[in-house]
Amino acid sequence: MPKNTKVTQHEHSNEAVTESVADLLSLEHPMDYKSSQMSMGLSPGSTAPVKALLPSPDPDAEDGRPAWNNKMEYILAQVGFSVGLGNVWRFPYLCQKNGGGAYLVPYFILLILIGIPLFFLELAVGQRIRRGSIGVWNYVYPQLGGIGVSSLMVCGFVGLYYNVIIGWSIFYFFQSFQYPLPWAECPLQRNGSQAIVVPECEKSSATTYFWYRQTLNITSSIDDTGGLNWKMTLSLLVAWILVCMAVIKGIQSSGKVMYFSSLFPYVVLFCFLVRGLMLRGAVDGIAHMFTPKMLEPQVWREAATQVFFALGLGFGGVIAFSSYNKRDNNCHFDAALVSVINFVTSILATLVVFAVLGFKANIMNEKCVVENAEKILGFLKSDVLSKELIPSHINFSHLSSQDYAEMYGVIKTVKEDSFAQLGLDACLLEDELNKAVQGTGLAFIAFTEAMTHFPASPFWSVMFFFMLINLGLGSMIGTMTGITTPILDAFKIRKELLCVVCCVIAFFLGLLFVQRSGNYFVAMFDDYSAGLPLIVVVILENISVAWIYGTKRFMQDLEDMLGFRPYAFYYYMWRYVSPTILVALIAATIIEMAVSPAGYNAWVESEGAERFQSYSPWALAMAYSLIVVAMLPLPLVYIARHFNLISDGSNKLSVSYRKGMMKDISNLEEQDEQRFILGKNPSETPSPMPAHRAYLGPGGTQGNDQHQLRHQHQDGLPEYWLTRV
């Protein structure tokens, strides 16, 4: 190294070194020495050169980390991740079950109290530290580094079964290209010379039969695996190929996919809303949605859970996406925007679902009236009922629901003792609307049945399942990013190779869900693998930032990063309100798991219906082991780092930062050589080292509201203190 370089001079000088490892790890923006008169060796009244020879390093480019092509791709990625299948088949069900329109009140309140603040927190830490979930929490508090590992494991569990649902949607999508739709009518079977309806289908319905028998070919219990379902296996393979193609290039490929996968579902939802409002009975369904009902404490628990999962908190996908942002990106605006879009999407999807289900309820009610009217005509012909019981104005050839209700009431009053033997149904529209359906029951049974009555039903079916594929794909991209980003941060692996390996492994592990009993395992993983572990992960995220790292310190970091101080509202939410609500949610979840029997809804072929069945001992052990395995990294990492058994990971966090520093030093040497040739004094070269910022880490003695910058001179000059409150 040349002796006249700035680096060599710095090594031989007696100047106190104020930089520390903490400064390097803090990933702060270097001080702008171009405008510093002291660093340029200028007198107080002098003017600095317009353009410095050594350009200021770009803190976002120095670590070589990929970045979003534009803000739109990033927002669409966050929207695609947060807006998923749950907005279509979980939120409408909760709205129907828990108070109709009144349910929106607790949901919106909890969205403000825990949804937006915690979403903002995850966006901010990812953007600030520019790492995936593991690297972020290693930096914030190494002993709680297990938070990132638990997030990664939950992402893995959820991704395994979530992509199976995409596989089901792919199967229905291809089945929709035929008229009539294959689930429109019950199939016939030969019984001698006669063709009769399959008994299993006759006892249930055409769409139910197609789902359980033609699609899943389901067994009667989780203990009977039944072997692989080859149709679902091929569908799962196609689903993983789609996911792999979408994420194989990282955000460069997934960002492009998001333009379609995030926007197309809104096109379909608006089309369905317009079409649904034109259907007979749609107004009845929407009116039923907004009918207020009594709110119970359980409603608040379910609303909090829905807010929690709707935004994708704790999965690591939110952190991973935001880690590819520039450090000065306004993540506060992003948090509010994505949360509002998610909420509005849930309401839009609920309007669509209730409009379509209102139409379906009217169709089923009319069918019920016709069937029971035929029974009454039979009773009249056989003199079981007297014709005098039928009001004179009733015309059986054009029987309305009101006429049937009047006739039903008269018969029930007169034949009170023997009425039950007649087997007549009330055929109330309210009963049809109150049939709560969620999840696969809504998408693959109730909604598909409604679409069979649509004009041009194959077209609407293709649109609907293509929408489900895109909704699921957007969420899977976020889930896979939450898995691959922490691994890429920790190890030098080609992202293409890592993506392919992850998808191949996930496909083979996913074969568990495409057995004939696979639907029962999907329900098990959905109930146990994500719920409690994710809530624990998020409360630890909240505590590590608000109570260990320090809320005041974090607010100061946000001010440095965003250019403005966030509202004090967030200070109180992060420090007090959100942790309190999350503790209550954990307690309520544990109580719910203890009170509710552990089991699943098994399909009984002979009855053509579902029946609750308790888990066998091995299945129960497997269910609870999902919770244990997902949460196990939390205590293991804490113990290992508390006793210094493993590294705290800080050396990996600072790799990219040190690369940027070495690059600056290298550039500095080149500039020194140029200055030597040009006859300039090397001492005029601006220092590449960032100004010292007092490290306010856990256990630090410095105040959280002050950051001090100290510049010390040796030649008897006074010390300059730059203090910002």
Image (spheres, rainbow, N blue to C red):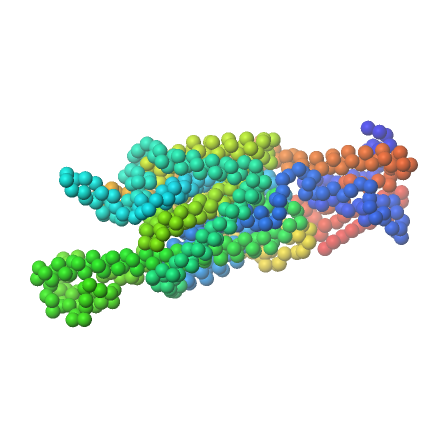
In the image, is residue 214 above or below residue 379? above
Q: Residue furthest left?
A: 383
**Residue 292, placed above or below residue 533:** below
**Could you say where residue 297 lies in the image, as x and y percent from the top left?**
41, 58
As drawn, the residue found furthest toward the right would be 679
Query: Measured from the top left, where is residue 317 in percent x and y?
Result: 53, 43
Location of residue 218 in the rendering, given as x and y in whole percent from the top left corner: 30, 39
- The residue that appears at 89% across and 49% down in the rendered structure is 43
User: Quarter holding the N terminus?
Assistant: top right
The quadrant where residue 136 appears: top right
Q: Is residue 149 in view?
A: no
**Foreground of the two, 216 or 513:** 216
Residue drawn at (32%, 54%), measured in percent from left and top?
Answer: 453
**Residue sitting at x 89%, y 38%:** 681
605 relative to 477 in the view: left or right = left
Of the 4 image quadrants, the one containing the C terminus is: bottom right
Residue 499 point in image, percent of width and height: 53, 34
Seen as rendered, the residue at the extreme top is 1
Closer to us: 491 or 170? 170
Residue 623 visible in the current orientation: yes
Q: Is residue 411 left or right of residue 429?
A: left
Q: In the visual, does 370 lie left or right of 535?
A: left
Q: How many marks?
A: 0
Name the residue: 76% across, 43% down. Answer: 56
